Image: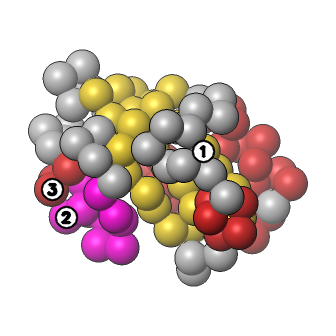
């Protein structure tokens, strides 16, 4: 899949270095993936939570941070919509958020 907003993730781990390993691992898996649906994504990330037909929430750095990504399976694109602390995630609407 092609990842949109990779630079956003890199900027985030510069501010939160404890997320770097998790995010680099996530990027490596997504970049090689050819997922066709949310079920396939959850096969790769067992703690991922499907929010709707296109959005999935991922735990980062042991669940202290959250990542929301919108997928276009037909075009093989993953759009980063939100990355933040667990508390920041609780304050947003993960279905509509588009922070980047």
Sequence-earlier tag: 1 or 3 = 3
Q: Which residues are magenta?
A: 41-50
* Number of numbered discs visible in the structure rendering: 3
Q: Is residue 28 above or below residue 86?
A: above
Q: Which residue is mark 2?
A: 43
Task: Report which residue position mark 3 lands on.
Answer: 39
Identify the disc placed on residue 73.
none
Left or right, residue 69 beside residue 48:
right
Q: Is residue 16 visible?
A: yes
Is label 2 or label 1 in front?
1
Q: Residues within 10 Å of mark 2 (few under 14, many from 20)?
A: few
Q: CA distance from mark 1 to mark 3?
A: 21 Å
Pointers 2 and 3 in contact (C-beta within 8 Å):
yes
Is the residue marked by circle 3 packed among few (<14), some (14-19), or many (20+) residues within 10 Å? some
Magenta run includes residue 42: yes
Residue occupying image coordinates x 15% and y 56%: 39
* Residue picked out by circle 1: 82
How crowded pointer 1 is (Cα within 10 Å; few <14, some 14-19, many 20+) is rated as many
Residue 66 highlighted magenta (yes or no): no
User: Residue at position x 86%, y 54% from top?
Assistant: 15
Query: In the visual, does 81 lie left or right of 31?
Result: right
Q: Is residue 99 above or below residue 60?
A: above
SS class, disc 2: helix
Dividing the picture into quadrants, the one containing residue 81 is top right
Q: Quadrant of residue 64?
A: bottom right
């Amino acid at each position: 899949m092609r990842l949109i907003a990779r630079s956003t993730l890199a900027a985030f781990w510069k501010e939160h270095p404890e997320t770097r390993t998790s995010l680099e691992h996530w990027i490596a898996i997504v970049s090689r993936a050819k997922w066709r649906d949310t079920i396939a994504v959850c096969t790769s990330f067992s703690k991922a939570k499907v929010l709707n037909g296109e959005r999935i929430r991922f735990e980062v750095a042991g669940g202290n941070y959250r990542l929301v990504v919108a997928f276009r399976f037909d075009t093989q694109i993953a759009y980063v919509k939100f990355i933040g602390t667990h508390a920041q995630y609780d304050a947003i609407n993960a279905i509509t958020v588009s922070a980047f």
